Amino acid sequence: MNSLIKVGLIGFGRMGRFYFDEMQKSGRWSIAYICDTNPKSRELAKKISPGTKVVENENEIFNDPEVQVVGLFALANSRKEQIEKAIKGGKHVISEKPIADTVVREWAAVYIAENTQLFTTVNLYLRNSWYHNFIKKYISQGEIGELAIIRVCHLTPGLAPGEGHEYEGPSFHDCGMHYVDIARWYAGCNFKTWNAQAVRMWDYKDPWWLQCHGTFENGVVFDITQGHVYGQLSKDQTHNSYIDIIGTKGIARMTHDFKTAVVEIHGVNQTIREERPFGGKNIDVLCDLFADSIESGVRHPNLPTLKDSAIASEYAWEFLENAKGNDLPAIGDMQTLEKIIERRRTMKNGYGLLQHT
């Protein structure tokens, strides 16, 4: 193995700390910098990583020729310019999604990345999950016949409106673009038709639940349901998350409880039940694939691209826009939303604080 890969992390909130933890565990990375504009985040960074240079100004990272990789984990409105600075400075990029705060700026970031030999990737974490790769392997072996229908559902209490992700968009964009992406990953082509219905829960300005169905260019049919509306004030919180794939001969499906994922294949030759740890956001897998790419000089084919992210983001916005043209009811009131936000603020555990994507 080559010497440790020097990386600078920009944004040391929840996601930034996830990357920090996984990079430290792997033994393949040297975390040279941590950058955050929040004094409390910088103070925490100094405490848990005393050997790392902690800075407020991101340009210290971009201007250091020894930094090989930049991790972009602040909010989406900063990422397009950060990608541009990184590429200009000769640095590889790992980014959270979306890669910018508007579709136009996302595609600008894609064009920047595609005109360089440097490696870039984005955390479309479902592509790196063991369960989706397990299912796709059996589909490719013909166990369910021809792929016909893709059904995805992800309903949790999750992130409430107004809790700080405004640049990432409403729930179906911020979180739902992951499910738009994984449906497209299974289908192997772009969406062709769609029809969406949404609800403005608690009278919030944007919809927080959306269901969309339609077709892909190859004729595969899909439906995607996503929302952070699932029992926000219930005594014992729960969720409903699955993928259900139907072929001409058999089926494959997955459910999880954020701790364990269960895959069932009912194929023409095999009936399989596989149960393993859920794996969270699979940041360890993403970081290892990226490290492999840097060390070998060859981009790993399983790394999601910035273009993948831009496409998923654009379709998520398209589905949201389509829903606005189909009766968009408002149900509930702001007083209930205030109670939800207060409950989430005081929760020590549970789906509300720990899982929102």
Image (spheres, rainbow, N blue to C red):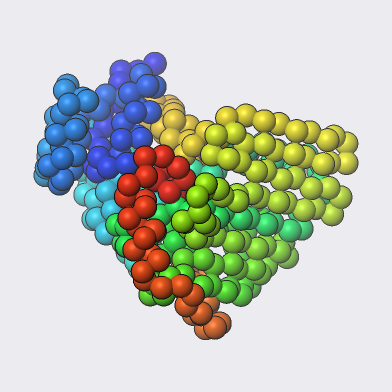
In the visual, does 14 lie left or right of 256? left
Judge whether 252 appears above or below 332 on screen: above
Task: Examine the image and state in which quarter residue 254 appears.
Answer: top right
Camera sees residue 293: no
Judge whether 236 appears above or below 103 on screen: above
Task: Examine the image and state in which quarter residue 64 appears.
Answer: top left
Q: Kindly identify the residue that appears in the image at 72 percent across and 51 percent down.
A: 245
Judge whether 291 appears above or below 231 on screen: above
Q: Could you say where residue 287 lies in the image, as x and y percent from the top left?
A: 41, 32
Between 36 and 62, which is closer to the camera in this rendering? Answer: 36
Q: Could you say where residue 157 lies in the image, as x and y percent from the top left?
A: 48, 54
Q: Kindly identify the residue that appears in the image at 67 percent across and 36 percent down.
A: 262
Between 28 and 154, which is closer to the camera in this rendering? Answer: 154
Between 18 and 193, which is closer to the camera in this rendering? Answer: 18
Q: In which quadrant of the rendered image does the N terminus lie?
A: top left
Q: Could you say where residue 42 lies in the image, as x and y percent from the top left?
A: 15, 37
